Image (cartoon, grey):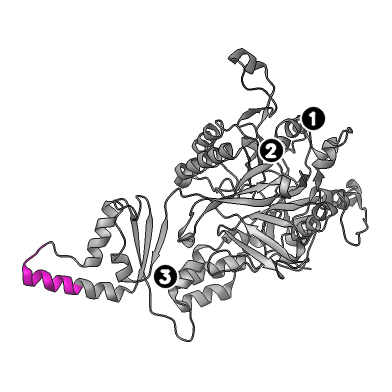
Amino acid sequence: ANTQFHIGDEVVLDIEDKAASEKVVVGVIEEKSGNGWYTISLSNESHGRDGEISIERPKVKRRGPQLKLLCNSGDENTSTSSSLVEREVVEKDVNSESTAHYNSSEDESGIIDLDAILQSTQQFKESGITDDNIRQVRNCHSKCNKWVVFSDLHVMPSTLSTCLKVLDFVHATALRRNAGIMFLGDFWHHRGFVRVDCLNAVLEAMGKWKVPSIMIPGNHDQIDWRGTDHALTPLRTSYQIFAQNSDREHDDNDIKSLEQYPGPLILSQPTKLFGALFVPHIRDKKRMNSVLASKEAFQSNALFVHADVKGASMNDLIESQHGISASAFPPERLVYSGHFHKPHEIVVGKKSHPNSVSIRYVGSPYQTSLSEAGQTKSLLVVDSAKNWECIDEIAIDVGRKYHRVSSVNDFLGLAHPEKSNGLRQGDKVAVMVPQQILDEMRVIAHASKKSTNDVSEVSPFDAKVNELRASGVSVEIRDTQPQLKDSGTTPLDVEQAVDEVQFEDLSPEATLEVYISNEVASGSLGESTAEKILKSGV
């Protein structure tokens, strides 16, 4: 039996005293140590009065032979994390029958049909939807047809000021359009913790919002592979709004008596609402495919997801190879997704064909890294009254810009920040030129200095670097080589590709391989040493 597991794998524990246990014990690999020992967080969630799942889970240590995968698809890139429903099926030793085409809401897809709940007078406590949620949706969110969509904010200390500008711009846009706000995941950057200063600043910014919002968590927001607990929770009461049919032309005393509701509606599970299916990030491919094959998905006019789709552009050079298949999405439905930062669309089949699938990545609202150099960012405006069609695209231009320059002449031609079409303070320029060329320019400058007795003489390249840095532009110089033999790829292409690799989405072996390749490309590691490291494995 295979006794090698990865962090995030969901496993069944071998209980020594089988008579003492009437059910299978399931846990998630949380830590991997030497000599084959694993730390497992047991899956024994308890539900509180508000439907919150307790995050206090006992931990045990087991060796590999004492464990087995709960769900093993045979694909090392497929997460083995299962839904709560799957774990209950294992514990009760119940064999469920699969449907021929659609999945019901009671199977492993775990979809909440909020549309059905809103239309029914029955109570649906098992869904986790409270009476407050129902009143919130009926009195506020259901009044909006238009929604301003953005995604992948990635708040962290280094991006905080830019993110606050994005939040203000998004809210101002929604107010002008009489629209709500929709966010498709990855609000925070660092998984598992949120900086207090960042949280306070975000709460202050969102405290000014006056329109309803719908949010789904992305992989960066979730604290583990299960996705149940996430960092959007502190935002759910970040601001209050009046019922949309309330008369706001009252005096202050009257306004205090009007009913208010939380502005954010955070959908932590796949949820059907307003004729659309909202799907937070799901690492378990089996469960994700079940959600996409459900009757709720086929009954929806659109899907809003945070997904890694095979063939989507991770950047301008790399396409995803390990995501879910685009053909898994129901055809002839509008699909909007967060996750990848490049705004683009992938189409399976001809777009006008009745069975075609079109998935539109919203992209990040600002350039988050050098791999996004040259990308234009925008917000989308969608209309639920028009089957969630995108009715407008609004350009957004905030934060630092990244620039890639691959020749000395192009670098010297960059405009100064004081010029209207020039660089801006805070921008970052990466110059990819061979060190040999720079050395030759400095030799010429040195010879010129001797002949003219000008002690301040420097090469034009170095002078430009000093000028830009003095004006607040970050300049990074990267040594590169001419085009590689027998390929159309240059080291610049390789570096750009490496910049955008999402290491957390790779297997440990793939992560090591990418890291070693990057070290070799930068000259920090020799090829022979790299080969030895890769042979030894992880």
Labelled disc at residue 131: 1
- Indicate the quadrant where residue 229 lies: top right
**Secondary element at tag 2:** loop
Q: Nearer the viewer, residue 421 or 437?
A: 421
Q: How many marks?
A: 3
**Secondary element at tag 3:** helix
Q: CA distance from mark 1 to mark 3?
A: 58 Å
Labelled disc at residue 36: none
Three-letter code, disc 3: Ser
Q: Position of residue 440 (x, y in %)?
A: 23, 76
- Indicate the quadrant where residue 50 lies: top right
Three-letter code, disc 1: Asp
With 488 as the anchor, is 321 left or right in this view? Answer: right
Q: Position of residue 299 (x, y in %)?
A: 82, 52
Labelled disc at residue 522: 3
* Residue extent of the magenta highlight: 443-455
Sequence-wise first label, 2 or 1: 1
Q: Are marks 1 and 3 in contact (CB under 8 Å)?
A: no
**Secondary element at tag 1:** helix
Q: Nearer the viewer, mark 2 or mark 3?
A: 2
**Res. 59 in view:** no
Residue at 65 percent of width and 52 percent of height: 390
Q: CA distance from mark 2 to mark 1?
A: 20 Å
**Res. 94 in view:** yes
Residue of label 2: 144
Furthest-top residue in this view: 253
Q: Nearer the viewer, residue 191 or 201?
A: 201
Residue at 74 percent of width and 50 percent of height: 387
Three-letter code, disc 2: Cys
